[in-house]
Image (spheres, rainbow, N blue to C red):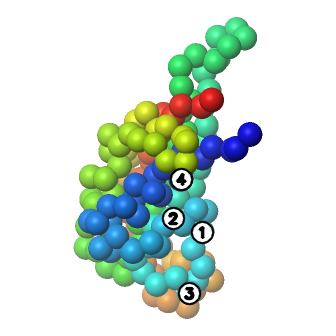
Amino acid sequence: MAVRYPDKNVRNALISDASVTHFVGHRVFNQYATPETPLPFIVTRRTGTEREQAFTVPVGVPRLTLNLVCYAATFEVARELADAVRRCLDGFSGYFDNTQVKQVAVEEERDELVQLAGSEKPPAFAVEMDLDIWWQET
C-alpha cells in the first residue's frame, strides 16, 4: 500500500504556481534547506495530524497541520512571497499522487527575523504560516 502525503500536494501546488516560482523556482523543501540554498526559499514541516474518532470508527476526514516558512534576504521579498503562497494555497483543493486534498486554510501568519542554522550569512527575513489541510485518507 502506498503511503500518502498531502504535504506533497502543497509542494506540487506551489511549484506549479507562476507567482510562487517567480521567487523560489523549485526551492520548496520538507523539514530543512541546506546552508548553501540561495534565498529566497520555502520550508514546510508537518506539526500534527488529527483524526477524530467515534467509538470504533473515524469521523470525517483527517486534518493535517503544516508549518510553512518563506525565507528571503529582505522583508519586502519575504512578504511578497508569502502573499503569493497564501493566494495559491488558501482554499486550495485537488489531487496529486492519488491523494485528495479537500481544503487548505491559512490559519495564522507571523513575521520574523532569523539567523539560518549553519550559515555565515546575515540574518534572513521570514514569514511563517500555519496551514490546516483536510484530506481524504483511504
Mark 3 / mark 2, whichever is N-terminal: 3
- Marks 4 and 1 sit apart, C-alpha to C-alpha, by 15 Å
> At which x and y percent is residue 133?
47, 39
Identify residue for label 1: 32
> At which x and y percent is residue 82?
32, 61
Report whether 36 appears left or right of 124: right
- Marks 2 and 1 sit apart, C-alpha to C-alpha, by 6 Å
- Looking at the rendered structure, the secondary structure element under dot 2 is strand
Q: Amino acid at mark 4?
A: Lys
Identify residue for label 3: 36
Q: Amino acid at mark 2?
A: Val
The numbered disc on residue 19 is none
Name the residue at the top extreme: 55
> Mark 2 near mark 1, Cβ–Cβ under 8 Å?
yes
- Marks 3 and 4 sit apart, C-alpha to C-alpha, by 23 Å
Identify residue for label 4: 8
User: Which one is closest to the eye, mark 3 or mark 4?
Assistant: 4
**How many C-alpha atoms fall within 10 Å of the one at disc 2: few (<14), some, or many (≥20)?**
some
Identify residue for label 2: 43
